[in-house]
Image (cartoon, grey):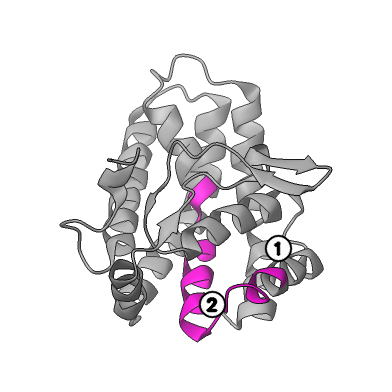
Amino acid sequence: MRLAGEENGFAGREENPVIKEYARHNRELRKVREFVCRRSVKSPFEIAFLKGYDQMYFWADRVLKILENMDLDSVFKEAEAENHMVHGDYNYHNLLVCQEGMAVTGFEHAHRDVQMEDLYYFLRKCMEKHHYDERLGYRMMRAYDSVNNLGKKERDYLAIRLAYPEKFWKITNSYYHSGKAWIPAKNVEKLSLSVAQTEEKKRFLRNLFAFQI
């Protein structure tokens, strides 16, 4: 049986696929900046993008350089050797509170990968909603650690994933591939918020992971 999303598993991929992913994201950010700079009349979204670009690209570039010098190969090798599975879209939209306890739905994107990916995605989504609340983040990580050990390698992996300006890239990428004719005001707000939360995230990473850009 072939799982949906299995193409995102281990077969034929590099030892550290996150480097390849972030290098591609950074190229895309530079490409969008070049495109926006060439436009004579800029939309509110494009103005907000240029305003936040330097700060966000600094983070994106620094994360990639730090990642290239980190030894995380064992994380991927262990996940491959033990056939680790991930949900692939683990967030509060796929969690149900039932009388008997919690239930998880939406396994369409399940595939083999580093299990920290699920925790990273869930933690990032929650922290964006709660302005990188350190106490909440600590409780979430402690709850995970009580079931599945969070060692130094796992924490390093989480920190580097959380540090990348994923939301800024995601909104920017959506804009670039949308036709650019009309951008919802909500997207401008989301983009600006992703920039505004940088200091909150910086403090969160420093205090919970001893990680600094």
User: SS for tag 2?
Assistant: helix
On the rendered structure, is 197 left or right of 84? Answer: right
Q: Does the image show residue 164?
A: no
**Residue bounds of the magenta highlight:** 143-167
The residue at 32%/80% (across/down) is 74
Identify which residue is drawn at 28% across, 72% down.
81
Is 145 inside the magenta-drawn segment? yes
Eyeballing the image, is 32 above or below 165? above
From the image, tell me which residue sits under label 2: 155
**Residue located farthest toward the top when viewing the structure as drawn:** 181
Looking at the image, residue 11 lies above or below residue 153: above
Q: Quadrant of residue 33?
A: top left
Spatial CA span between label 2 and label 1: 19 Å
What is the x, y in percent for residue 96? 72, 40
Magenta stretch mostly in which secondary structure? helix
For the N terminus, give its image quadrant: top left
Asked whether residue 135 is in view, the answer is yes
| Rendered position, 66 above or below 22 | below
Look at label 1 and name its amino acid. Glu
Residue 211 x/y as whole percent: 56, 79
Q: 10 Å neighbourhood of mark 1: few (<14), some, or many (≥20)? A: some
| Dot 2 amino acid type | Arg
> Which residue sits at x=57%, y=37%?
48
Crowdedness of circle 2 by 10 Å Cα count: few (<14), some, many (20+)?
Answer: some
Q: What is the quadrant of residue 98 in the picture? A: top right
Tag 1 residue? 200
